[in-house]
């Protein structure tokens, strides 16, 4: 009976080591963000998990149309192609370790996603509570631009 228990201990230990080796190789073991988030030192943060590059600083409060224009006209870190994030991208950032590398306000941020039922409203994510809701496009909220990273 003792040899059966010993075999199971060896199998479990080997499985654990293989899993740990896989995490180390993939860069997701240990540390905040596990290497997924990278401060590029040029005002941008790359989320290697999502493949997105984020503006590190929070842009001021502005109406939605101004926010869309601001993001699309942004040139940052030697990159163009910036835009306002979708509702899902912004919610993903809220849940990401990458936000720890950014200037984040405990308030609402605009997404580019227009409310399907109210064309005069767009979706917002609250970076204090993670709440996702919609607000009038004429209201002022914070802005953070995003682009496809590379």
Image: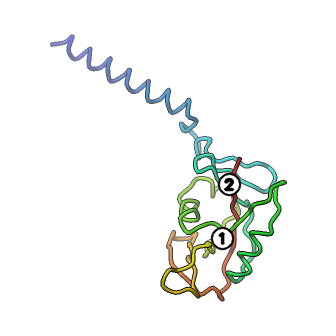
Q: In the rendered view, would you say 119 is above or below 47?
A: below
Count of numbered tags: 2
Query: Is label 2 in contact with label 1 (beta carbons under 8 Å)?
Result: no
Residue 58 in percent (x, y) is at 72, 68
The one nearer the camera, 113 or 77, is 113
Q: Is residue 4 left or right of residue 67?
A: left
User: In which image quadrant can residue 76 be found?
Assistant: bottom right
Residue 143 in percent (x, y) is at: 69, 72
Q: Is residue 40 left or right of residue 84?
A: right
Q: Quadrant of residue 100?
A: bottom right
Residue receiving disc 2: 148
Residue 146 or residue 80, whichever sits in front: 80
**How far apart are the alpha carbons under marks 2 and 1?**
23 Å
Name the mark nearer the viewer: 2 or 1. Answer: 2
Q: Residues within 10 Å of mark 2 (few under 14, many from 20)?
A: some
The residue shown at (56%, 73%) is 126
State the image coordinates of residue 28 (x, y, percent, origin top left): 55, 39
Q: Nearer the viewer, residue 91 or 64?
A: 64
Please tell me the numbered disc located at residue 116. none
Q: Is residue 106 above or below residue 97?
A: below
Circle 2 — which element? strand
Judging from the image, what secondary structure is the residue with disc 1 in? loop
Measuring from the top left, give residue 47's x and y in whole percent: 63, 50
> Which residue is disc 1 drawn over?
105
Which residue shows up at 69% across the image and 61% down it? 146
Q: Residues within 10 Å of mark 1 (few under 14, many from 20)?
A: some
Residue at the top extreme? 3
Q: Is residue 17 left or right of residue 29?
A: left
């Amino acid at each position: 009976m003792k040899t059966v228990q010993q075999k199971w201990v060896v199998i479990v230990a080997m499985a654990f080591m293989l899993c740990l080796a896989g995490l180390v190789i993939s860069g997701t073991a240990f540390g905040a963000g596990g290497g997924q988030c990278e401060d590029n030192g040029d005002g941008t943060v790359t989320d290697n998990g999502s493949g997105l590059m984020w503006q590190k600083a929070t842009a001021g409060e502005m109406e939605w149309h101004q926010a869309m224009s601001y993001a699309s006209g942004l040139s940052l870190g030697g990159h163009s192609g910036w835009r306002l994030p979708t509702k899902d991208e912004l919610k993903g950032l809220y849940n990401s370790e990458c936000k720890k590398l950014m200037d984040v306000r405990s308030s609402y941020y605009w997404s580019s996603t227009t409310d399907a039922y109210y064309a005069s409203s767009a979706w917002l994510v609250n970076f204090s509570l993670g709440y996702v809701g919609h607000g009038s496009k004429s209201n002022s909220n914070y802005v953070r631009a995003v682009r496809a990273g590379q």
